Image (cartoon, rainbow, N blue to C red):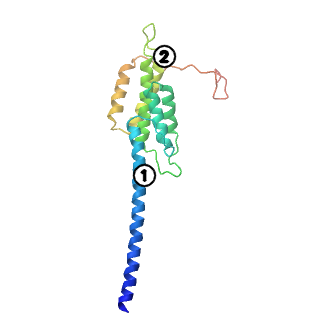
Amino acid sequence: MKNTSYNKNRNRKNQLLGLILLTGLVGTAYEVYQMNKIGKVNHALLSGEVVNDENYPFHKKFADAYQQGKTGNFKIAVQGFGQLLEAPKKKQGNAFEVTPHLKSQIQFNIANNLFRSGLQRLVGADGEIHEDALYAYQQAKPAYEQALKLEPTSQAAKFNLSLLLSVIPNNIKAVAKEQSGMEISNLPQGLP
């Protein structure tokens, strides 16, 4: 009688341990799948390729903006990175959070694209620095400063900011960009 009771308990323990083992194997397989999927996205981001996985919209947008800047579409790149700064803090269904480090990287990329845009239009036919270049430089400066505020140890941002400051003439004043004809406020131009 004791032997039968002992065998039943042992069978129950074996079944329970088998169930735990099966659950662990399924969980491990799922984690390996997720790591593989994340690894592909990370590889695409590191190599500058476009991310096509719809489960990572933030990363897809970042890679798209980076690719635009890489191909010389600086204005589109700046707009894309700017949209990333307006992204929600946490994505529903995905525990992704825009950290200060990531915000610093976004600001750095905005500044780089503005700086490169200014370098592209550096001088006019008369040898003077083009107004669009000055405007781009003046927009890049606060973006580099914001990147450094968020990540003070960023050597790349420090270097690029010092390079930008060496390109901007010391005696320039803020360049007023022409308005596009669309008035944001209700007040007409020229009235207090």
Q: Residues within 10 Å of mark 2 (few under 14, many from 20)?
A: some
Instruction: Give the residue drawn at x 52%, y 42%.
Output: 87
Q: Quadrant of the C terminus?
A: top right
Determine whether 38 is above or below 155 in the image: below
| Residue 173 seen | no
Instruction: Please say if the residues under marks 1 and 2 sit with CB atoms less than 8 Å apart.
Output: no
Q: Earlier in the sequence, mark 1 or mark 2?
A: 1
Please provide percent x and percent y for residue 154: 34, 36
Q: Amino acid at mark 1?
A: Gln
Between the C-alphas of marks 1 and 2, the distance is 49 Å
Spot occupied by residue 68 in the image (x, y as percentages of width and height): 47, 29
Does residue 21 sit above or below 121 in this rendering?
below
Question: Residue at left 40%, top 49%?
Answer: 36
Say which residue appears at 42% left-offset and 61% top-offset. 26
**Residue 125 higher or lower than 141, as above or below:** above
Mark 2 = which residue? Answer: 131
Residue 127 in view (yes/no): yes
Q: Position of residue 23 (x, y in %)?
A: 42, 65
- Helix, strand or loop under label 1: helix
- Tag 1: Cα neighbours inside 10 Å, few (<14), some, or many (≥20)? few
**Residue placed under numbered mark 1 in the picture:** 34
* Residue in the foreground of this view, choosing between 116 and 46: 46
Report the front residue among 135 and 23. 23
Can you say which quadrant of the picture contains the N terminus?
A: bottom left
